[in-house]
Image (cartoon, rainbow, N blue to C red):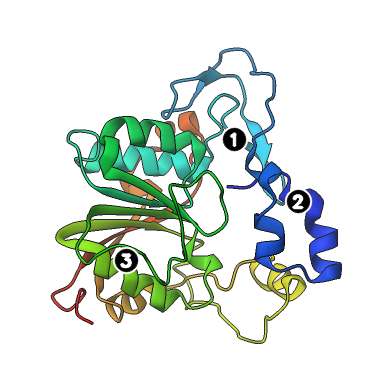
Amino acid sequence: MLHGLARLLPTIESAGLDEAAVYERRTLYDRPRAPVPAGGLLRCPVCGRSASRFLPFGLGGRRNAQCPDCGSLERHRFLWLYLRERTDFFRRRLTVLHTAPEPCLEAPFRAQHGRGYVTLDRFNPHADVQADLTDLPFPDAAFDMVVSSHVLEHVPDDRAALREIARVLKPSGRAVLMFPFDPRRPTAEDAAMDTPAKRMAAYGHPYHYRIYGSDTPARLAACGLSAAVVATRDLLSGHRRRRHRVNTNHLFLARRTAAGGAP
């Protein structure tokens, strides 16, 4: 999760900067601190902070998006609630691979799982391992869980990344995957969107290569992962979505198929 990317958009688009040129800027990983609004009806489930309002975030400046204390966004709060209420993630120690770790989640995840928790990122200097998701430096069946939120849409060859996720999962393991997803239409993906400016126009972000769609379960299955999609409405009532500021979102709970670890 980068901060200040919106300010760089004109330069990114005009100069055609690639992802490495931008994501290797260490200052983008430092969240600017902001005054915390007085306590109110909104509550962040990640850090427990109550506030009268949350902060804007994103390239479009979404209102009430970011917790002013821990920095969580809507998708992080949904993921947190799902892991807490629908999995054993917070009830026992697991081996966990967390890709592109979000600071608001990394500290509590590491406290829960200790040495079994590993973070990975191509560019983030704070990650435990700096590597490409399409070529993971881990043995087969190494992890009980892989957590990957809003990473796969940044990977040109996401099928290679999905095969690697399947490979490093234990036979009983699970992957929780999140990415831009529109269930009303097939995946939007076009190799002709080959510049940051074109991808910004097509997908709303200079470094996104697709918006996943209704064919996503088949895409995962072809890479050795069977998956069920969970929507925010499946987990949270309208009252809880409003209180925790969770927008319409989805996650995929994926398991390795019998052939998922095969070469």
In this image, 93 relative to 30: left or right? left
Q: Give the number of the disc on residue 165.
A: 3
Residue shown at 69% from the left, 19% from the top = 35
- The location of residue 95, given as percent across then percent down, is 23, 47
Residue found at the very far bottom of the displayed protein: 192
Q: Return the residue nearer the eye: 223 or 218.
A: 223
Residue shown at 81% from the left, 67% from the top = 13
Q: Amino acid at mark 1?
A: Gln
| Proximity of marks 3 and 1: CB atoms separated by less than 8 Å | no
- Residue where numbered disc 2 is placed: 6
CA distance for labels 2 and 3: 30 Å
Q: Is residue 241 visible?
A: no
Q: Earlier in the sequence, mark 2 or mark 3?
A: 2
Q: Give the number of the disc on residue 66.
A: 1
Q: Amino acid at mark 3?
A: Ile
- The location of residue 249, given as percent across then percent down, is 46, 52
The C terminus lies in quadrant: bottom left
Q: Between tags 2 and 1, which lies in front? A: 2
Q: Between tags 3 and 1, which lies in front? A: 3
In this image, 146 relative to 152: left or right? left
Q: How many marks?
A: 3
CA distance for labels 2 and 1: 15 Å
CA distance for labels 3 and 1: 29 Å
Q: Amino acid at mark 2?
A: Ala
- The location of residue 262, given as percent across then percent down, is 19, 79
In this image, 82 relative to 45: left or right? left
Q: Helix, strand or loop at disc 2? A: helix
Q: Give the number of the disc on residue 244.
A: none
Q: Is residue 166 visible?
A: yes
